[in-house]
Image (spheres, rainbow, N blue to C red):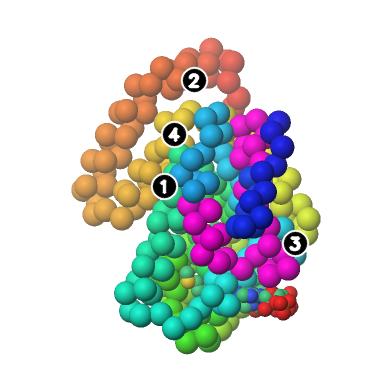
Amino acid sequence: MNSPMVDKSTFLEVDQQEEILFIKLNRPEKRNAINDALILALEAVFSTIPAGVKCAILHGEGPHFSAGLDLSELRERSVVEGLHHSRMWHRALDRIQFGTVPVVAVLQGACVGGGLEIAAACHIRVAEQTTFYALPEGQRGIFVGGGASVRLPKLIGMARMADMMFTGRVIQAEEGVPMGFSQYLVEEGAGLAKGIELAKRIAQNAEMTNYALMHVLPRIADLGQSEGLLLESMMAAIAQSSPEAKQRLSDFLEGRAKKVGE
Ligand code: 1HE
């Protein structure tokens, strides 16, 4: 186990424990608000996942996952500066979604604005009971800029996202599960343990399977039916031809592998 690396200038803590990389937003006194340095640090970390890591867990210190964009950095920006700022978020969150390892987000308290955009870029979300979701951009007179208009409708539907921004509606953790915000709901304080349990399972998958789920499945979902089906067939053929897949199939047929649900 390596000792945690804390970058005081960016409030990001990175800690590798065997196959799992823990990435912690560590700015609790400002509710893990994301300033430019922090979003750039996230981009850097997810661009350089160390060899041997098979899954990452993104979580936040303190009672809130993240209060979103650091509003104290919002200043008079030109249109072009605003574009660059939003594109910087897009770059960083693309590194999370389309990086080298699956990412489990562990959420508690506020998961709002840019914090929700970051959570939506992760592959699995575990919410503690205290979690709440909101898009205060609507009330602050701005628009989402970290990819929410692309990623959130895929999770929760466009009408729900529009409602959150029109009305300032806050969604609580429990109602958020059937809506698609999180796939798991756990008691307060139990999020990290659940995240670790899931990360360990994900780390056991064939690397090609995790790659296909991260990089191919979302592209297929964006395609028309005939292109999507063709890409699926190509991915299936590549995956089944790998030595690891052949080994796993014979393990099952010869009674050495777990059954479904075990
Ligand atoms: C902040 C921020 C922030 C807290 N930027 N400093 N996001 C928002 O509009 C959410 C704004 N925040 C809140 O509504 C509340 O802080 C919370 C519901 C998240 C938490 O409430 P609470 O009572 O626990 O904390 P607090 O007393 O409001 O905040 C503690 C400190 O954190 C305080 O600073 P202090 O120096 O007075 O102690 C707050 O000012 C500071 N703080 N949130 C800066 N967001 C890619 S575009 C994305 C666009 C967006 O994300 S817009 C949504 C922004």
Kindly identify the residue that appears in the image at 65 percent across and 30 percent down. Answer: 18
The residue closer to the viewer here, 255 or 247, is 247
Which residue is under mark 3?
Answer: 62
For residue 188: magenta?
no
What range is drawn magenta here? Answer: 15-43
Q: In which quarter of the view is residue 3 placed?
A: top right
SS state under label 2: helix
* In the depicted structure, whether residue 153 falls above or below residue 202: below
Could you say which disc has been placed on residue 98 in the image?
Answer: 1
**Tag 3 near tag 4, CB within 8 Å:** no
In this rendering, which labeled residue sits more in front, label 3 or label 4? Answer: 3
Dot placed on the residue nearer the N-terminal end, 1 or 4: 1
Which residue is under mark 4?
Answer: 209
Residue 112 in sight in this render: no
Q: Position of residue 232 (x, y in %)?
A: 30, 40
The amino acid on which the numbered mark 3 sits, given as a three-letter code, is Gly
How crowded pointer 3 is (Cα within 10 Å; few <14, some 14-19, many 20+) is rated as: some
Kindly identify the residue that appears in the image at 55 percent across and 66 percent down. Answer: 35
Which residue is under mark 2?
Answer: 248
Whether residue 189 sits left or right of residue 226 in the image: it is: right
The amino acid on which the numbered mark 4 sits, given as a three-letter code, is Thr
